[in-house]
Amino acid sequence: MYNSIVNFIRHIFNEQEEFIPLHAPVFVGNEKKYLNDCIDSTFVSSVGKYVDQFEDKVAEFTGASKAVVCVNGTNALHLAMLLIGVEREDEILTQALTFVATCNAISYIGAHPVFLDVDLNTLGLSPVAVRDWLDNNAIIKEGQCYNKKTGRRIKACIPMHTFGHPMMIDELIDICNKYNIVVIEDAAESLGSFYKGKHTGTFGKIGAISFNGNKTITTGGGGMLLFQDKELGLRAKHLTTQAKIPHRWEFMHDEIGYNYRMPNINAALGCAQLENLERFVTDKRETATLYKDFFRNIEGVEFFTEPDHCYSNYWLNTLIFKDKKAQQEFLKYTNNNGVMTRPVWQLMNKLIMFKDCQTDSLKNTEWLEQRIVNIPSSVRLKK
Ligand SMILES: *Cc1c(COP(=O)(O)O)cnc(C)c1O
């Protein structure tokens, strides 16, 4: 059976011999042209027209009022928390089923992640789990939400749109609003994914995107923040540029800033990649349909499909095996046979840095950890 799956994957990627990666970048547009332009003009660093263009184009595509580039998705998340006033010792609600960057960013501020369960039909943070946990643990004092047991302020909630599939963001925001908790969306994996027709990352106060090499489009390394509040976006820009007050020759700074701005050369790559984003997502969705039809006839494993009301970019295609044994056997067989597959990240609450953090039962999270395998998902457009 595993052999027929490997053959099918080789067939759809039209690759009979070579190693098939999980997600490789594809450059079929103006990448070289724009990169050459940067070099010819000498504008390769933190100033240049591609930075502004890239921000404007992403804002237009996602429907955000303002988009601000960062050096990567991790510092985009860090900056988002600084912007909404997260402080040392605050608590941040998030999911244990995520990439470590989400929790690292929380730790940069000295805040504490709290790990709550995900939904089986979205793989993202469960609004019901958040509500239940808040109903049992939270209290509002002078307009702020506090944890009754630890006494710490619960400042923000960071849901993640796992593998590009939108979670139930509107329901989550309703609950967080009742508790005065700010929502920041970790939309690192979900550029090109929409929930009820609206782009992921534009529901919360701030959304964070990643353009790492394995994401749907790449700038080499890079990130972006999405804002509805334009003023907050302008403040983000200020913080990413060492909090320098714009002036033609004077160097003046009015607070502690960061060197978090994406260089022009990366933004040039991003502009070229963005021109193909819709083609890429269409292609990825076709791959997902091929997988879906194929796995319908395979026993003991299910292909994960986009939740209701969602248009997903299918960043990483996902299988759910019947049990851990089948998951492990499949991982071994495929990786031994030149087809890269991988389990979900080790759960955050099991990492040594976060092992003492609060959690709920994490029932669905642990069930999924034993069963998820991601399979090759690169864009298949011909070079
Ligand atoms: C990729 C990713 C990030 C971080 O992005 P980088 O650009 O690699 O720093 C954050 N969160 C999630 C869920 C991611 O998948």
Image (cartoon, rainbow, N blue to C red):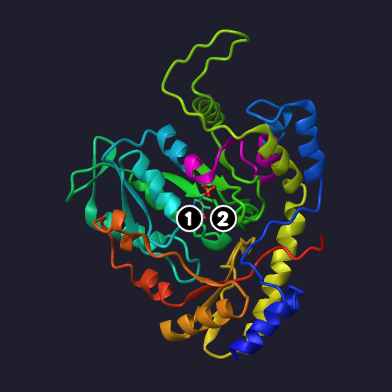
Secondary structure under tag 1 reads: loop
Q: How many residues crowd around disc 1 within 10 Å: few (fewer than 14), some, or many (20 or more)? A: many
Whether residue 180 is visible here, answered yes or no, is no
**Amino acid found under the numbered disc labelled 1:** Met
Q: Is residue 355 above or below residue 51?
A: below
Q: Could you say where residue 170 lies in the image, as x and y percent from the top left? A: 49, 53
Does any atom of ligand 1 lie closer than 8 Å to the CB of label 1?
A: yes
Question: Which label is found at residue 160?
Answer: 1
Label 2, on which residue? 189
Q: Which residues are magenta?
A: 55-76
- Depth check, mark 2 against mark 1: the one in front is 2
Whether residue 164 is visible here, answered yes or no, is yes
Q: Disc 2 vs disc 1: Cβ atoms closer than 8 Å?
A: yes
**Quadrant of the image containing the N terminus:** bottom right
**Amino acid found under the numbered disc labelled 2:** Glu
Q: Is residue 311 above or below residue 47?
A: below
Q: Could you say where residue 380 lies in the image, as x and y percent from the top left? A: 75, 66
Q: Is residue 80 left or right of residue 117?
A: right
> What is the count of numbered marks?
2
Q: Could you say where residue 36 lies in the image, as x and y percent from the top left? A: 80, 37
Furthest-top residue in view?
A: 250
Q: Residue at point 42% right, 19% down?
A: 255
Does any atom of ligand 1 lie closer than 8 Å to the CB of label 2?
A: yes
Residue 278 lies in the magenta stretch: no
Q: Is residue 159 left or right of residue 264?
A: left
Distance in Å between CA atoms under marks 2 and 1: 8 Å
Q: Could you say where residue 138 lies in the image, as x and y percent from the top left? A: 24, 50
Q: Is residue 160 above or below residue 3?
A: above
